[in-house]
Amino acid sequence: MDAWVVVVDDDVSNLKMAGYILSKNNMRVTALKSGKALLDYIGTNQPDLILLDIMMPDMDGFTTLQKLREKQTGKDKIPVIFITAAEETETETRGLRLGAMDFIKKPFNPEVLVLRVRHTIELVRLQRNLMQEVERKTLENESLYKRLSLHMVETMAEAIDAKDTYTHGHSRRVAEYSKEIARRYGYTEKQRDDIYMMGLLHDVGKIGVPDAVINKPARLTEAEFALIKEHPGKGARILNNVKEVPGLVTGARWHHERYDGKGYPDGLAGKDIPEEARIIAVADAYDAMSSYRSYRSVLPQAVIREEIRKGRGQQFDPVFADIMLGMIDEDAEYKMREQEDERDNKPEQG
């Protein structure tokens, strides 16, 4: 990875340590000692990522990020990871709401520093590449599947899933389950291909959710859950420019709505929820229960079946819940779940 990282910290020892670690891992590093120096520097430079200290004299990291975002718009925004020794939840909450992608604690753990920097840069590059591909193909006025490369979308889905240490192949499985539900319901081949694409990108908004929140093994705080609940809206904004394929926005924005109206982000109910989103909601919930998570192992098939049954007409559209129940009943060997060979690590079976 040929990456360029700007590190901003008033402490010279921290600058040297970060520079040493990142340079050793083949990254170009620029060291700056103040927020003002960063704002001046960014005027004529476009690095891949900024590591920004919070506690600095004259202009702290929060103020610096605010001023930076005022200068940058749209795809020119440079991703920012805050570096801090603070442990307060309020500090992280404020930073995340300002648009920081993650936090790294000081003193640095070299492996964590390198992995988070690389992962964030990779996600942002994939997002930009996806949008560039869509724009390029749109200008060529080609058909949907020539405008939007399936390979690019699958790569994007894999990058989204990689944010969760415990979930591998989630977007692909949700896409496959959604496509099968749609087939049984009577969708045409074209409609099934469309919902497959929607399923692949239903969680694209998680690009904007910090890894630390997604992978937290303990109960989320209200502030952290609020960040999770923002991902449908973030996903819709990412896909909103694909005017020719409004369904992509449909899957991303409304897959967490509930049939009884108690879901998010818009509190839609019943048939007001787009049909594709109602299908993806059942597929998403099924895969969440049949996959490993940071806080539990795969649930038994009978438990999942009962949860889907209980959610019928409340969380789920009863028609699509019934189709999923039929799929579960046909899966006598419980093969419709995350397989061990899809994972590098998993929690112990309990």
Image: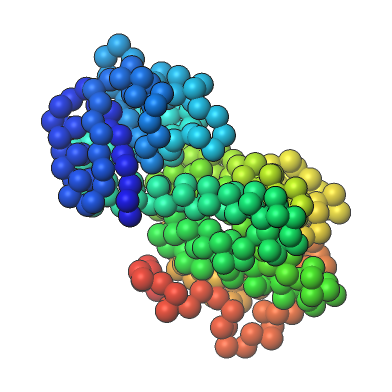
In the rendered image, residue 7, in percent from the top left (x then y), is placed at 27, 33
Quarter of the image that includes the C terminus: bottom left
Quarter the N terminus occupies = bottom left
Task: Name the residue rendered at 54%, 38% in the picture.
Answer: 75
Q: Classify residue 36 as left or right of residue 242.
A: left
Q: How many marks?
A: 0
**Relative horizontal placement of residue 319, taking residue 129 as reference (left or right):** right
Q: Position of residue 314 (x, y in %)?
A: 76, 56
Q: Give the x, y percent position of residue 111.
A: 23, 52
Query: How is the model colour-coded?
Result: rainbow
- Residue at image coords 68%, 63%: 146
- Please identify the quarter of the rendering in which residue 287 is found: bottom right
Q: Residue furthest bottom?
A: 332
Quick check: can you spot residue 61? no
Using residue 8 as the reference point, say whether residue 237 is left or right of it. right
Q: Is residue 340 above or below residue 200?
A: below
- 309, 198: nearer the viewer: 198
The front one of 10 and 218 is 10
Residue 89, image quadrant: top left
Work out whether 329 lies above or below 250: below
| Residue 14 placement (x, y as % from top left) | 18, 32
Q: Horizontally, is 24 left or right of 128 in the view?
A: left
Residue sitting nearer the eye, 311 or 191: 191
Q: Is residue 34 visible?
A: yes
Residue for point 79% across, 75% down: 189
